[in-house]
Image (cartoon, rainbow, N blue to C red):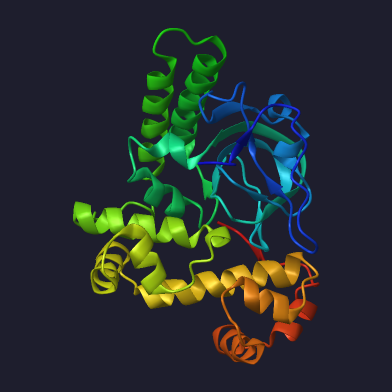
């Protein structure tokens, strides 16, 4: 995806006034594979950034040690190693942790082209961190270690090996208790996955079912049916949640005015946005911004 990767030591994009920092993936060369893996130490200090920020890429984190919290979309999750966490493009997160150890796997959406269904698994994994039992922890550690060795040492066919290992890692993670379920028909799954992926790209400004259907190349009616089949929820419901989630990110993470936030999430009329936000959250945007200064609720997975 254009603009999702940069060469090492490329200066970070300066966020627009009031917006959150947006991090791009550093790659070795302009045509390099949009992928990297390493420990928190080898990836660098940005891998454990303590300030809210977004990515243009996916991040899979295998936490093997540390205490404190991982804050994702302003929900605070207590660390409980061994643990697996996924951050998808567009999510806001930061670490409030000490002695953090483990591996970090970073890759853009392009890396998933051979296995598009993996996007849906990653989306579901991103809803919370996942504490691993002994067997899952050992398996995850082995796969991540293989990814790290292949990435560092490589050889002929390295790209194919990395993609294959990543697919196995994602599929195995998708079997974690509470995540595995029956799969919908392939076409509906594909359309539903693309719908949720695009909802996670707020920079596209696609804030209607019709606009998303046109982008995917299906009719609004088919999109509505496919999303219901793939997710068990309506497209309109997911759209409302996405707009509310993005508004919350702006209200808590930036100093944009309510009028500006309304515009960023597709509302031309700030008054209508305020009514929408109150209906979805029970609070006005101003009240939510003020109460958001309190420490986020702590969740135990």
Note whether 64 is above or below 182 in the view shown: above
Q: Give me the residue at 25% from left, 65% from top.
A: 226
Front residue of 5/189: it is 5
Note whether 104 is above or below 132 in the view shown: above
Q: Is 84 displayed left or right of 283 in the figure?
A: left
Front residue of 51/175: it is 51
Note whether 266 is above or below 41 in the view shown: below
The answer, for residue 94, to whether it is visible in the render is yes
Q: Is 84 displayed left or right of 213 in the figure?
A: right
Front residue of 158/110: it is 110
User: Which residue extends farthest left?
Assistant: 185
| Image location (x, y in percent) of residue 209 | 39, 73
Q: Give me the residue at 41% from left, 77% from top.
A: 237
Note whether 276 is above or below 138 in the view shown: below
Of the 4 image quadrants, the one containing the C terminus is bottom right
Q: Give me the residue at 56% from left, 87% from top.
A: 276
| Image location (x, y in percent) of residue 14 | 78, 49
Residue 65 lies in what quarter of the image? top right
| Image location (x, y in percent) of residue 294 | 79, 72
Q: How many marks?
A: 0
Q: Give me the residue at 58% from left, 70% from top.
A: 245
| Image location (x, y in percent) of residue 71 | 68, 56
Q: Is 289 displayed left or right of 155 in the figure?
A: right
The answer, for residue 175, to whether it is visible in the render is no
């Amino acid at each position: 995806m254009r603009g999702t990767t940069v060469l090492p030591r490329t200066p970070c994009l300066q966020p627009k006034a009031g917006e959150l920092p947006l991090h791009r993936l550093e790659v070795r060369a302009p045509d390099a594979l949009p992928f990297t893996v390493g420990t928190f130490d080898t990836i660098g200090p940005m891998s454990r950034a303590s300030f809210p920020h977004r990515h243009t890429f996916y991040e899979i984190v295998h936490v093997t040690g540390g205490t404190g919290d991982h804050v994702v979309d302003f929900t605070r999750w207590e660390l409980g190693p061994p643990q697996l966490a996924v951050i998808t493009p567009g999510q806001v997160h930061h670490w409030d942790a000490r002695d953090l150890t483990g591996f970090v796997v970073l890759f853009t959406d392009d890396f998933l082209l051979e296995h598009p269904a993996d996007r849906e698994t990653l989306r579901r994994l991103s809803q919370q961190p996942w504490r691993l039992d002994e067997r899952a922890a050992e398996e995850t550690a082995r796969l991540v270690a293989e990814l790290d060795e292949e990435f560092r040492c490589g050889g002929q066919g390295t790209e194919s090996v990395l993609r294959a290992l990543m697919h196995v890692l994602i599929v195995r993670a998708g079997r974690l208790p509470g995540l595995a379920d029956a799969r919908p028909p392939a076409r509906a799954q594909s359309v539903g996955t693309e719908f949720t992926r695009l909802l996670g790209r707020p920079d596209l400004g696609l804030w209607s079912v019709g606009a998303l259907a046109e982008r995917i190349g299906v009719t609004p009616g088919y999109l509505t049916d496919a999303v219901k089949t793939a997710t068990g929820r309506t497209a309109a419901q997911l759209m409302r949640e996405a707009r509310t989630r993005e508004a919350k990110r702006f209200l808590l993470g930036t100093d944009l005015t309510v009028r500006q936030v309304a515009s960023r999430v597709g509302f031309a009329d700030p008054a209508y946005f305020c009514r929408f936000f109150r209906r979805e959250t029970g609070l006005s945007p101003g009240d939510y911004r003020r109460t958001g200064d309190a420490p986020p609720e702590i969740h135990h997975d």
